[in-house]
Amino acid sequence: MNLSQLDTSVFIVYVIGLLLVAAWVSRTEKGHQRDTSDYFLAGKALPWWAIGASLIAANISAEQIIGMSGSGYAIGLAIASYEWLAAITLLVVGKYFLPIFLAKGIYTMPQFLEQRFDSRVRTVMAVFWLGVYVLVNLTSILWLGGLAIESVAGVDMFFGMVFLALFSVAYSLYGGLKAVALTDIIQVTLLVVGGLILSYLALDAVSDGNGMLAGFVTLTERVPEKFDMILSPDNPHYASLPGLSVLLGGMWVMHFSYWGFNQYIIQRALGAKDLNEARKGIVFAAYLKVFLPIIVVLPGLAAAVLYPSLSASDQAYPEMMKLMPTGLKGLIFAALVAAIVSSLASMCNSISTIFTMDIYTHLAPNRSQRHYVNMGRMVSLSALGIAMVVAQPLLGQFDQAFQYIQEFTGFFTPGIVAIFLLGLFYKKANGNGALTAAVGSAVLSFALKILWPELPFIDRVGLVFLACLGLGLLVSHMGKGDGEAKAIHLQDIHFASKPSFNFAALGVVIILAALYATWW
């Protein structure tokens, strides 16, 4: 599939417009020198709408749009649990985790770990996250983004990767998190509008031109098995989404690791004006997560009816894009690229923040704020260069690059969640207990994968998490209270939330309960 001249023109207008907006929001007052707070945390002045939009823009990328649509094609609506349970996770993070992080005044998650445990834990986790972000996340975003551009626009994959890297650098390198977050409202708006248009056209095609509602009814009648939210053990995709374990087990561990303790995500909330503004942004993001399956899953469900014989499920979204008329196809392509470059920019900003604030400032202390900001910019460029070089060797062997992400990060996710929960809520937790949980996560995950290969991935994550939590508790308890000196005194943290937050959170829960009750 190639883009017409009109589609290309629409896309060029988007690129130029975004660069102009990024340049405008990145400007500084005359005489003001941008410091690390400005560059890495947007001066701690982000409004709620920028926080919420940026959370989603950072989360949604090529693997999310194309992969989720492909999973919708193969598995059905059950894959939406990744989106809907994330909405609940966000509310818990906003209510119970953010108050602690903001009270500590941190820049990074490793910084919190040093405050709570010791410098060993900070350094180990900083190095770990840098490795994962550069060699797994950043690389996969570039690789899958290049594949997406090749399949949609017919541009060679390598040149597509180069374009994505240069585009993300052009609008984010100078302004830092502020440029990323404040332009993400454009990215999310484009993503939502373009996605809704595609979903409408898909449902209209399913109903043979009788409209969206008729198309949805036809879907439920033609492929009723695709609307089972809880898969039974005899379902061929049970290993991917193992029944009630989705609601009660390891998926929660994955979500809390991603949405609660992940620098790439939580950095937006750390840049909020205050706790109430951060919570409003969290609720906004939660409602967007409830809504997202309409954009990222529904096209795959429609493709199951319109194109039941695709050779690969991930072809569903590019195939559905062919329904778009000239001009609108350029809009959808712009939305897809918007999702990719916003994720790239967010990832680069988080990489530069962790390296600069957790590693470089200790190696080169007492340098100027300008020096640290420039170092952050150089780190962003270096990370993109490394990702470009290693993308083919690391990901070229995988039929689905998303598997690479899940397999690698899934070995460490249980330990990360155990470390943070112990640090937040167990006064006796110490550095040895945290490091034991981290090492135990990798060792136990590899052991279970080898010794119990038929165990579903989500169940393995849940079991390893419980084991890591137990190991952390045991080793910390043996430390005879040496962790209590740095314990968090929860009675000093302001957990109370405004009625508006509570009411909005209740709305999310009611909507999700209704959705699960309808398609149980």
Image (cartoon, rainbow, N blue to C red):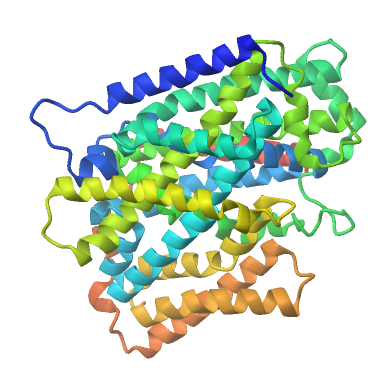
Give 440 or 497, whichever is nearer the viewer: 440
* Residue at the (82%, 53%) spot, across then down: 237
Which residue is drawn at the image coordinates 59% and 40% (left, top)? 158
Percent across and percent down for residue 351 are 38, 52
Left or right position of 183 against 387: left
Q: Quadrant of residue 511?
A: top right
- Comparing 21 with 48, the one in front is 21
Q: Position of residue 501 (x, y in %)?
A: 41, 37
Instruction: Decide: is 2 above or below 272.
Output: above
Residue 308 percent across, percent down from the top left: 90, 34
Q: What residue is drawn where x is 68% and y is 28%? A: 154
Q: Is residue 156 found left or right of 364 in the rendered image?
A: right
Asked whether the viewer can see residue 281, the reply is: yes
Residue ID at (33%, 66%): 113
Question: Which part of the image, by quadrant, shows the C terminus?
Answer: top right
**Looking at this view, is 187 or 226 the one in front?**
187
On the image, the x and y values in percent for residue 433 come to 41, 80
The answer to whether one can see residue 502 in this image is: no
| Residue closest to the far left | 31
Quarter of the figure with residue 328: top right
Which quadrant does the N terminus fall into? top right
The vertical placement of 470 against 369, above or below, is below
Compared with residue 11, is residue 159 higher up or lower down, i.e. above or below? below
Taking depth in this image into account, of 92 and 206 the one nearest to the observer is 206
> Taking 420 as reference, is 210 left or right?
right
